[in-house]
Image: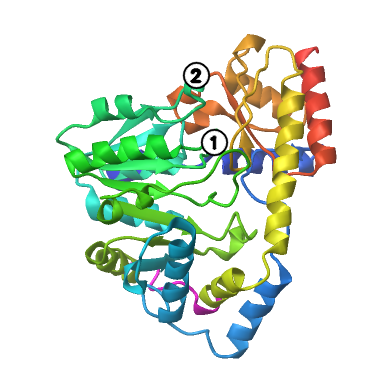
């Protein structure tokens, strides 16, 4: 079989590869602590499950509009307006099976072969993967430790060319846990407005904030029609397997994104969209408790990592990842990640899984129990001879 040439440009997520290898080791009887995958270790709240069941019993099991059910688009727009101070209408919302389709569809709709997309680096690998897939160039916008892994607006401005069609930002950020300040966002907006470039703002960790205050670039004057604001339910409500995400954007673009949905997924499952409404309307206690737990785990993980020889780790402002600097160990980050799994039984990711500027770092997810996090730290201490 001869595949289309474009398939050679399509990447993957290393987290799933490491997860698969960890699974193989577990089948061999090894005890593995999973710190590689970005998935809450909590159950979806029962009230959301009950709402999905009720929706199925009520007949929400057939095709729906490609852009989403009208009542779901209305409620999701209201949520964004309540949390970001925006004024989106239901017609500017597109609901998809998970957040990733919005990334894919936005790049397909806006970026031609030979164009450029500015992506955070280190950053979520799908940004670069889809950009390269469509024949465009992913231009890395470096995130450096001396800026607490926040994008440098001045450096961003120097990367914009006449070929730039899209700027991607992610705050709170995967993999570093950094969070852009309002000052950062205003400076980024100035660049986007000056060059009339769309910004895809990836915000699924908006509720996972521990230090500082979350802001969206959509709040900045002049950015409403230049922003694709991406949200989802996976992280806040432990709904990763439900596959429910959405984005707000100007209506003429929303119509085109919906057309791509028609040609791929047809629509998002109607009963799951109704569960999303229930998630927003229902009691937020379980979600709030989950966020508090992630903050506690972050503190324990960061404190523990900073006691390991050759390791230093900033405390992330949000998300549920930590991004320790391991250059002091003298071990290449790829090799160290491999040894963590194979020798210590701790599944982590090399920072290089998120781009070349991740070299010298590891990414660990704090979505595991305090007991397992403490055990992982001790296993790593033994591995590093501490």
Asked whether 360 or 14 is in front, the reply is 360
Crowding at mark 2 (Cα within 10 Å: few <14, some 14-19, many 20+): few
In the picture, residue 276 is in which quadrant? bottom right
Name which residue lies at 45% across and 37% down: 181
Q: Give the x, y percent position of residue 283.
A: 68, 69
Q: Give the x, y percent position of residue 44.
A: 69, 64
Q: From what the image shows, is residue 64 above or below residue 45?
A: below
Instruction: Identify the main secondary structure in magenta.
Output: loop
Residue 266: say if magenta: yes
Q: Secondary structure at mark 1?
A: loop
Residue found at the far left of this picture: 162
Q: Secondary structure at mark 2?
A: helix
Pointer 1 or 2: first along the chain: 2
Asked whether 97 or 189 is in front, the reply is 189
Q: Is residue 194 left or right of residue 234?
A: left
Asked whether 28 or 97 is in front, the reply is 97
Q: Which residue is the site of mark 1?
A: 175
Q: Give the x, y percent position of residue 264.
A: 36, 66
Crowding at mark 1 (Cα within 10 Å: few <14, some 14-19, many 20+): many
Q: Which residues are magenta?
A: 263-271
Q: From what the image shows, is residue 299 above or below residue 39?
A: above
Q: Give the x, y percent position of residue 82.
A: 48, 63
Q: Is residue 105 left or right of residue 24?
A: left
Numbered circle sitting on residue 146: 2
User: Gap in Å between the C-alphas at discs 1 and 2?
Assistant: 16 Å
In the picture, residue 64 is in which quadrant? bottom left
Pick the quarter of the image with the C terminus.
Answer: top right
Name which residue lies at 60% across and 75% down: 278
């Amino acid at each position: 079989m001869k595949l289309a040439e474009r398939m050679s440009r399509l990447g993957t997520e290393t987290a799933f590869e490491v997860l698969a290898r960890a699974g193989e080791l577990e089948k061999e009887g090894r005890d593995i602590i999973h710190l590689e995958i970005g998935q809450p270790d909590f159950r979806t709240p029962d009230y959301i499950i009950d709402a999905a069941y009720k929706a199925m019993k009520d007949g929400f099991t057939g095709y729906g509009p490609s852009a989403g059910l009208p009542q779901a688009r209305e409620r999701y727009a209201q949520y964004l307006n309540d949390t970001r101070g925006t004024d989106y209408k239901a017609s500017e919302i597109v609901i998809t099976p998970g957040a990733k389709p919005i990334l894919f569809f936005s790049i397909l709709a806006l970026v031609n072969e030979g164009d450029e997309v500015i992506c955070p680096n280190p950053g979520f690998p799908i940004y670069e993967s889809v950009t390269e897939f469509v024949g465009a160039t992913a231009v890395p916008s470096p995130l450096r430790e001396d800026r607490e892994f926040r994008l440098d607006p001045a450096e961003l401005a120097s990367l914009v060319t006449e070929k730039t069609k899209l700027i991607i930002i992610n705050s709170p950020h995967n993999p570093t846990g950094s969070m852009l300040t309002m000052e950062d966002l205003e400076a980024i907006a100035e660049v986007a407005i000056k060059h009339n470039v769309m910004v895809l703002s990836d915000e699924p960790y908006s509720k996972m904030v521990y230090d500082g205050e979350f802001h969206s670039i959509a709040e900045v004057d002049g950015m409403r029609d230049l922003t694709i604001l991406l949200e989802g339910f996976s992280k806040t409500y432990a709904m990763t397997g439900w596959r429910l995400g959405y984005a707000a954007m100007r209506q003429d673009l929303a119509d085109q994104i919906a057309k791509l949905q028609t040609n791929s997924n047809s629509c998002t499952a109607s009963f799951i969209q109704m569960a999303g409404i229930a998630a927003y309307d229902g009691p937020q206690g379980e979600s709030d408790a989950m966020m508090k737990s992630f903050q506690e785990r972050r503190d324990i993980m960061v404190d523990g990592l900073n006691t390991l020889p050759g390791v230093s780790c900033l405390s992330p402002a949000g998300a549920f990842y930590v991004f320790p600097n391991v250059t002091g160990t003298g071990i290449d980050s790829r090799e160290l990640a491999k040894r963590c799994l194979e020798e210590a039984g701790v599944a982590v990711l090399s920072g290089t899984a998120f781009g070349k500027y991740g070299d010298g770092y590891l990414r660990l997810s704090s979505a595991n129990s305090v007991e397992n996090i403490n055990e992982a730290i001790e296993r790593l201490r033994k591995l590093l001879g501490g």
